[in-house]
Image (cartoon, grey):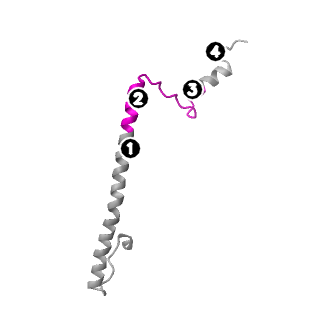
Amino acid sequence: MPLLPGDSQDRFRNARHHCPYHPERPKLIEDLAAEVVKLKGEEARRDEVFRKQVEAQKSHGKVLEKKFDELFKRVKEDPDAPPPVRDIDLD
């Protein structure tokens, strides 16, 4: 039995096309070589960001150690001084 234009199955197909649970299919790759170059470029950017984060993490320990030494020196110079006021203490 052929489907009529107003049939329930036809409405289901149209509703499904606009349904948010069924996203549109990704576009087909036109030029495979261009896509490979694009992916390799993304890989290089990810590697660069990773290297920068690793370097920042290495220097982070040195920065914290320097801050600790500076505060420790202040405490040794004046042990009776009140602790510094933090932002959270002002609330």
Q: Which mark is residue 12?
A: none
Q: What residue sits right under mark 2 in the picture?
A: 35
For marks 4 and 3 on the same chain, the one whose residue lies earlier in the sequence: 4
Q: Position of residue 22 (x, y in %)?
A: 57, 31
Q: What residue sits right under mark 3 in the picture?
A: 17
Q: Is residue 12 magenta?
A: no
**Vertical side of 70 occupied by 63: above or below:** above
**Which SS class for mark 2?**
helix
**Which SS class for mark 1?**
helix
Q: Which mark is residue 5?
A: 4
Q: What residue sits right under mark 1 in the picture?
A: 46
For marks 4 and 2 on the same chain, the one whose residue lies earlier in the sequence: 4
Amino acid type assigned to the residue bearing label 1 in the image: Arg
Furthest toward the top, the residue is 2
Q: Residues within 10 Å of mark 1 (few under 14, many from 20)?
A: few
Residue shown at the point (33%, 51%) measured from the top left: 52
Q: Which residues are magenta?
A: 15-42
Q: Position of residue 70 (x, y in %)?
A: 28, 75
Which one is in front in this view, the residue at disc 4 or the one at disc 3? 3
Which one is in front in this view, the residue at disc 3 or the one at disc 1? 1
Residues at marks 3 and 1 touching, judged by CB atoms closer than 8 Å = no
Which one is in front in this view, the residue at disc 3 or the one at disc 2? 2
Q: Residues within 10 Å of mark 4 (few under 14, many from 20)?
A: few
For marks 2 and 1 on the same chain, the one whose residue lies earlier in the sequence: 2
